[in-house]
Image: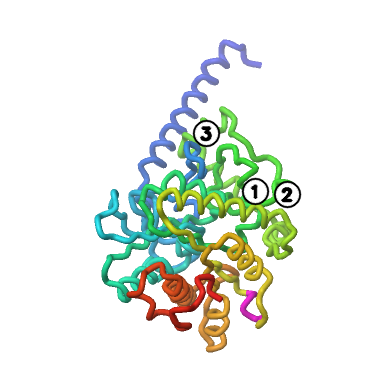
């Protein structure tokens, strides 16, 4: 066995060599150009300094491997689309859309999102005043993130109307969606973010000091992402159990949603804005003909609180009957689905008087149609 004094120089040499290799690797990762093709984690970044936990990376641009040639560009504010002026210019009517990957426009070009189609149609119907639709949709968000984002950022856009986009997975465990967008440790997630805290999965808390140090390193955090993708991806049964539509009105998720929407409405009213809900259907609802329990429950909430509700499910069913593909997957609409939602939003809110008399011609049901879309 070699004497200890002979081993120490060798150990020091190995340690110095390893440190140098890690340093070179860190520099190489940091200097590597932004990928033109990435996955969802390439679009998002954790924001432990913000109550909404994570968001889109300002300035990122490129394609997702899963959606082909669709181009995504995030503006300097951290949202899809052109950056709106602040303060709001005089004479501008501004609608702010908050929602998840549906509002963001997963799988479609920016000009095909319902927010942009809605803006185009609004300007055609009512050239004056000029209408802007600001899209603050972020993939994986639920009504809790949306409420926090509106309070922290959205109100600063000086909205005249806040339109919140509902998806049935708003009522599921948000951890699965948060994981899919970031794969990085988020700061402690409050119980209020969970529609049913009793179903919250264990192991979600503030990162340790060692982990926090790892996250500051591009090399370490990149290696951790790969490991998490392999080791923590839920199996198919877990995903299906977590994403089952919650239709029973007695479940706690509905009370949670009502509380979050009341928060969003209060923020909107404090900013001098109106409040409306766009209840996006999901693909398996299109086969039925009778009123769906989810839409019935949302209509009850809207009626109770006097909220304007846009329910495009009947229009989706009519369009599907004509043979038009409306969904990319279970939730995300095609460009045609976005157009249907935009037209129904325009019809319902114009009927409700949100644009005044100039746009009432958009109402197929006439000027006396109800704001709730009935």
Asked if residue 302 is among those painted magenta in the image, a careful observer would answer no
* Residue shown at the point (66%, 51%) measured from the top left: 195
Quadrant for the C terminus, please.
Answer: bottom right
Magenta stretch in the rendered image = 284-288
**Of labels 1 and 3, the one closer to you:** 1
User: Label 2 vs label 1: CA separation?
Assistant: 8 Å
Locate residue 278, reporting x and y percent.
52, 66
Residue at the far left in the pictured view: 90
Residues 354 and 321: in front is 354
Judged by its main secondary structure, the magenta piece is helix
The quadrant holding residue 117 is bottom left
> Mark 2 = which residue?
199
185 lies above or below 41: above
Residue at the far bottom in the pictured view: 322
> Mark 3 = which residue?
214
Of label 2 and label 1, which has the lower sequence position?
1
> Mark 1 = which residue?
194
Q: Are marks 1 and 3 in contact (CB under 8 Å)?
A: no
Of label 1 and label 3, which has the lower sequence position?
1
Q: Are marks 2 and 3 in contact (CB under 8 Å)?
A: no
User: Label 1 vs label 3: CA separation?
Assistant: 27 Å
Locate residue 167, reporting x and y percent.
58, 63
Quadrant for the N terminus, please.
Answer: top right
The answer to whether residue 150 shows anywhere in this view is yes
The figure's colour scheme reads rainbow
**Of labels 2 and 3, the one closer to you:** 2
Q: Are marks 2 and 1 in contact (CB under 8 Å)?
A: yes
Q: In the structure shown, which secondary structural element does the residue marked by tag 3 occupy?
A: helix
168 lies above or below 328: above
């Amino acid at each position: 066995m070699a004497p200890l004094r002979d081993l120490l120089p060798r150990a020091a040499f190995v340690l110095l060599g390893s440190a140098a290799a890690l340093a070179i690797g860190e520099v190489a990762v940091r200097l590597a150009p932004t990928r033109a093709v990435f996955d969802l984690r390439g679009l998002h970044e954790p924001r432990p300094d913000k109550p909404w936990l994570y968001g889109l990376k300002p300035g990122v641009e490129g394609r997702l491997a899963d959606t082909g040639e669709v181009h995504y560009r995030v503006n300097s504010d951290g949202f899809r689309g052109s950056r709106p002026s602040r303060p709001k210019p005089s004479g501008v009517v501004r609608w702010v859309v908050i929602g998840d990957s549906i509002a963001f426009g997963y799988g479609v070009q920016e000009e095909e999102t319902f927010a942009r189609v809605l803006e185009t149609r609004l300007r055609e119907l009512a050239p004056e005043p000029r209408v802007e639709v600001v899209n603050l949709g972020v993939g994986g968000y639920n009504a809790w993130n949306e409420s926090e984002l509106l309070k922290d950022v959205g109100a600063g856009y000086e909205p005249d109307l806040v339109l919140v986009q509902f998806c049935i997975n708003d009522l599921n465990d948000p951890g699965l969606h948060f994981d899919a967008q970031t794969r990085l440790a988020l700061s402690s997630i409050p119980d209020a973010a969970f529609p049913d805290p009793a179903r919250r999965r264990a192991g979600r808390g503030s990162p340790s000091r060692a982990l926090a140090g790892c996250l500051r390193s591009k090399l370490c955090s990149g290696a951790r992402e790969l490991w998490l993708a392999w080791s923590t991806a839920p199996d198919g049964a877990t995903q299906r159990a977590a994403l089952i539509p919650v239709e029973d009105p007695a479940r706690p998720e509905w009370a949670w949603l009502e509380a979050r929407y009341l928060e969003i409405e209060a923020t909107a009213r404090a900013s001098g804005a109106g409040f409306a809900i766009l209840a996006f259907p999901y693909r398996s609802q299109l086969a039925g003909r009778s009123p769906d329990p989810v839409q019935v429950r949302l209509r009850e909430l809207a009626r109770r609180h006097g909220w304007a509700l846009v329910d495009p499910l009947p229009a989706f069913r009519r369009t599907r009957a004509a043979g038009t593909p409306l969904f990319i997957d279970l939730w995300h609409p095609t460009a045609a689905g976005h157009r249907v939602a935009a037209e129904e939003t325009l019809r319902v809110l114009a009927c409700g008087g949100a644009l005044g008399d100039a746009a009432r011609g958009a109402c197929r049901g006439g000027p006396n149609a109800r704001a709730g879309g009935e």
